[in-house]
Amino acid sequence: MHLTCAECYVVVSGRGRLETLNYQGITTTELHPGDVVWFTPGTIHRAINDEDLRVIVVMQNSGLPEAGDAVMTFPPAYLSPATYPGAASLLDADGAPDPGRAQARRDLAVEGFRELTRQWRRGNRSAYEDFCAAAVELVKPRLDAWEKTVEDGALAAAQAALRQIDSLRNGDLNHLYQATVSRIAQPPRQTLGMCGFLRAYDPARRAGTSAGPQ
């Protein structure tokens, strides 16, 4: 569940489902090629690959998803600051990402998700509310850093657009003459993430590996 970011799936090929739980209830959304599906913070979600599902994932608030904006639906025993990091870690004993750890983490999150949906169907909304409260406690130490990420990213981009609108209003065209074209090559390696195997573009952008026209 993301706490401050919306998430969007652009379905490229294959077939799947998106199971969700938020304060509006439980839903299942079919995923077919060409579909665009998105959800806002507070939506617990589980993507299911029914047949070779491939999606492009677009995240709000560039940088926040990589900064821990999402909390996984582990059972309550794993939702404390003492227990969550170990359950969420993908690293093996040698400090390398381990697909086995990723699968174990996924299974633990699915276990918690299923229990939350069971409780909701029984009319118990407090289980969802308790999970949200636990998630907030887990991320509190990061909130100041998150604020700076938004200020330097999404907010800065919005403020720049407003300045450009004001410039146009005043007949100032200078920003048009400063236009650029950028490119990020496909990341050479897949990484493990909450959604499975990913090719993450934002870290490449932040590392300065984008290139001009070729």
Image: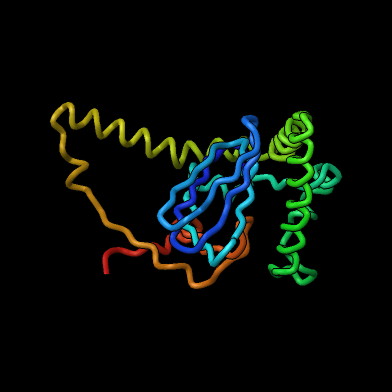
Q: Is 158 left or right of 75, judged from the image as shown?
A: left
Q: Position of residue 32 (x, y in %)?
A: 47, 56
57 relative to 125, above or below:
below
Count of numbered circles in the view: 0
| Rendered image quadrant of residue 212 | bottom left
Q: At 65% from the left edge and 33% from the top edge, which residue is drawn?
A: 25
* Extreme residue toward the right, this view: 77
Instruction: Name which residue lies at 77% across and 62% down.
Output: 104
User: Would residue 193 appear left or right of 159 to someone viewing this image?
Assistant: right
- The residue that appears at 40% across and 55% down in the rendered structure is 34
Residue drawn at x 25%, y 54% is 180
* Nearer to the camera, 76 or 81: 76
Q: Nearer the viewer, residue 201 or 107?
A: 107
* Residue 64 versus residue 16 in the image, above or below: above
The residue nearer to you, when weighing 55 against 100, is 55
Quadrant of the frame with the N terminus: top right
**Image position, residue 176 (x, y; %):** 19, 44
Task: Pinpoint residue 130: horizontal percent, then vertical percent.
Answer: 77, 32
Please, which colouring scheme is shown?
A: rainbow
Residue at the extreme left of the image, as rendered: 171
Measured from the top left, where is residue 121 in percent x and y? 75, 35
Name the quarter where the C terminus is drawn: bottom left
Taking depth in this image into account, of 100 and 47 the one nearest to the observer is: 47
With 19 as the anchor, is 174 left or right in this view? Answer: left
